[in-house]
Amino acid sequence: MNDHKNIKVDSSRRKFLRNASVLVSFASVPISFSLAGCELEAQDSIARELLQKELNIWVHLKEDDTVTISNPTSEMGQGSMTALALLIAEEMDLDWSKVNIINSPAVPDLFGVGWNGRGSKSMITVGSRTVRSYYTMLRQVGAQSRYALLKSTANEWSVPFDQLRTHNGFISHPDSGKSISYGQSLAFFDDGIKMPDFDENSLKQPKHFKLIGKINTRVDVPEKSDGSAIYSIDIDLPSMVYGVITRSPVNGSKPKLMNKQELEGMPGIIKVEMLDHGVALIGQTVQDVLNAKGSIEIEWSSAPADEHSSGEAFMSYVKQADQSEVINNMISEDGPVEEAFRNATQVLKADYFNEYVYHAQMEPLNAVANVKDNTAEIWLGTQAPGNARSAIANHLGLKEDEVKVHRTYLGGGFGRRSRHDYAIEAIELSKRIKKPVKLLWTREDDLQYGMYRPLCMQRMSAAINDQGQVVGWKHVIYGTGGGLLGSGARVEFYDFPSHAIGVNNIDHGIRTKHWRAVGHGPNKFAIEAFLDEVAEKTGKDPLEIRLELMKNHPRAKAVLQKAAEMGRWGDPRPDGVGVGLAFAERSDSLAACVCEISLTEDSEIRVRKVWAALDGGVIVHPDNTIAQMEGGIIMGMSSVLKEKVTIKDGKIQQSNFHDYELLRIDEAPEVLEVALIDSTEHPTGIGESGVPIIGGAIANAFANLTGKRLRHMPFTSDRIKEALG
Amino acid sequence: MEKMILKVNGKSHEVEAAPSDTLLWVIREKLKLTGTKYSCGKAICGSCTVHLDGTPVRSCVAPVASATNKEITTIEGLSESGLHPVQKAWIEEQVAQCGYCQSGQIMQAVALLNKNSNPSREEIVGYMKGNLCRCGAYMRIIKAIEKASELG
Ligand code: FES
Ligand code: FES
């Protein structure tokens, strides 16, 4: 395994790779092929075998026609490992039933991509960026791979290249009736072939797709249905020990351990280690470290976040907004907004409130690390393997190629796993104890040392003229979370004559982080609910006011109209049923939904039916797209109806799923229909598109049902009772 | 520490554990059956569900001593091929997203269908509500159970 020099990298293959400008443009990559070879070799034996196979770093074809495609993305349930392989397979005309997928090594220079295919390469799975970013590049890889096979065959058969056809993994020459499978053609494969460039126009047009938009199964589903899918928590290494950490209850506080000796004497405990932000226990089994964790006694230093309580923060936001209209960080400003407000016939104002929200991915954070003198390995469920590798190398003073990141499935990510604090912890413990360590975060650790979707308030204002039209729109966000706060605040599809949109960040010293669509959840809730308030004030129908504002945006209009049609907007509803709608864009996809709600006797909202429409450009994997919309809407409902982390004197007040409740299956809608708009446009992000539409739609349905407004998420029964008076 | 015999998926295993150790960690670490998952550790989420004599149990709060003399079934033991009718339905309906909750979901669903081969939607959600799915695959879990019930 360590003897990578045995791997033969012959010069003709190098030439093929160098010629393949998209496959690997080595000229511009500071990594030599032989180094890439080391990476592949060192990852595992399958990779070593693959390295010796044709055709290139992305596609490994065998004589028996099986094809293994490298997957650069982090599979956390969003399905893009299947979608990316489909891109290559489509352009290569592969037999999909012969395709296997393996995780590529964590080498962004080779396997990464820039945002939307442009700029510096990274292997980070965030912001619903994967399919749209790799869409052109991986189809080019497929086209070049196919070209190389065809060209070799044309030479071998002495026939003109353009007389050859490909279909389902076969090359044929109709004139002579000859045919050969891709795998068999390896016998005369010439890897010195010079590649032409394949620009977008020379790739297949959507109407010719045979796999894109047609395959409706995901490759990872079977192993996720029989318990064999491997997550980092499942990794077992010889002589591995277990670690847990008790971390600062208030962000930034430092530990003073009071009972080190006692802990060291507990059964199975090997070592007690002090960290800056906590105390680590290392032991023989999980049970040993969990038992000891229950007895740990720590005195914590004070920290700036001691001062922070989330309930009080809301009151301070209102006060600040009342005192001054200054916007510190303008996100978007257009037209004479101040004048619009000065001259308005009516000014409408409302504040919307959003609590901290926790990721709650079902697999708590964990990592398995093995640090030796000059190398480190880690088994990690990570959204950012390249960054994790750099951070680990940096932490240990190693070179990047001395760090191996083994990428496992992620039991959910939602933004939390694009940070690598947990990876560094595991590495540090392994380094100190000189053994492989599995670091486990308990659910309580995961919740209480979380990084939350920001606490925030949206102050919304509309200036309305004497015709009942909105002539000025203001949206100011007060909260803690810096750049996270503003996402989704722009109104790109509603053409107000003037607007001012911005953020006033107040740092409470709390860890905040992206959370599936991040600011889009709170901001689209505020925008869509407030727009309904404006509609009500001006005597307009919620659908009509939006269509009017969207009149220059035909794609957005079509999505909203589709959802309205599915949800029979305008039809009367039975007694006790309220109906609402909302629209939102996220990661350049456009989505809208109509929902029906009712209230239980305990004043809880039940979302009965949801009809949603999505325009995500070319849909690579339709069934998975629908699954993502379903999942996004249900996770969105969970955050809208139930979820809140509250902080008092810097401390998180929730600890597990009994007091941080998630939506359960008996609260799922009876009907959840998703329509996908037909499109030949470049794909856009879909993994998060379901989340931002549901908050506004539920709030609007509640107003439709009761005549009262809900402006504070989550819509718990207390708040509903309060709203109903 | 005591030696005890656990009968898991039809095979007997001798393990050394304290009687109060949780079944979950014994299954995962000592028997290396990692399909059963840890998520909350407090019987709130259902990820760790296994069967004891056919009854679904949250292994994260079950002391290992409570499982001796019982038939323990984990996701790995549901069928030889991984194609128990419930698993087949799970694949046909493409239920899994991140997949982490799914062993527990499937074990709970199998127990439901063993008791009630033709459950109504209300019975399904009533029986499954102890199993959380953060990815929000609930619509498909319901459909898959309905399908498995048809497949028999
Ligand atoms: S881990 Fe056992 S119920 Fe959650
Ligand atoms: S599939 Fe991810 S938690 Fe259920």
Image: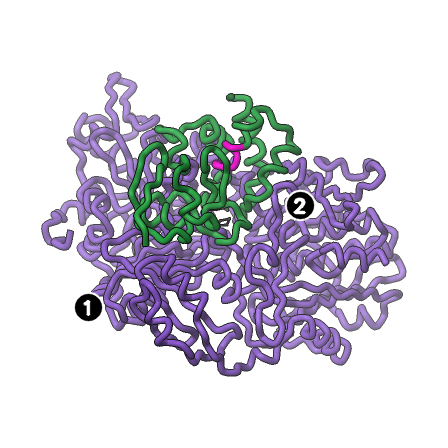
Chain colours: A purple, B green
Residue A333 coordinates in the image, percent (x, y): 67, 68
Residue B110 forms part of the magenta stretch: yes
Residue A311 coordinates in the image, percent (x, y): 69, 71
Q: Quadrant of residue A366?
A: bottom left
Which chain does the residue under circle 1 lie in?
Answer: A
Residue A425 forms part of the magenta stretch: no
Which chain does the residue under circle 2 lie in?
Answer: A
Nearest the viewer among A567 and B135 is: B135
- Residue topped by disc 1: A373
- What distance separates the C-alpha of mark 1 from that of mark 2? 55 Å
Residue B27 coordinates in the image, percent (x, y): 37, 45
- Badge count: 2
Residue in the picture at 31% in, 71% down: A395
Which type of secondary structure does the marked residue at label 1 adopt?
A: loop
Q: Amino acid at mark 1?
A: Asp
Q: Is residue A602 above or below residue A725?
A: above
Q: Residues within 10 Å of mark 2 (few under 14, many from 20)?
A: many
Residue in the picture at 55% in, 44% down: B131
Please give the range of residues in magenta: B106-111
Closer to the N terminus: mark 1 or mark 2?
Answer: 1
Decide if residue B44 is on the left or right side of residue A139: right
Decide if residue A602 is on the left or right side of residue A387: right
Nearest the viewer among A285 and A368 is: A285
User: Which numbered circle lies on residue A592?
Assistant: 2
Q: Is residue B152 above or below residue A291?
A: above
Which type of secondary structure does the marked residue at label 2 adopt?
A: strand
Nearest the viewer among B38 and B53 is: B53
Residue A333 seen: no
Residue A384 coordinates in the image, percent (x, y): 40, 58
Quadrant the N terminus of chain B occupies: bottom left
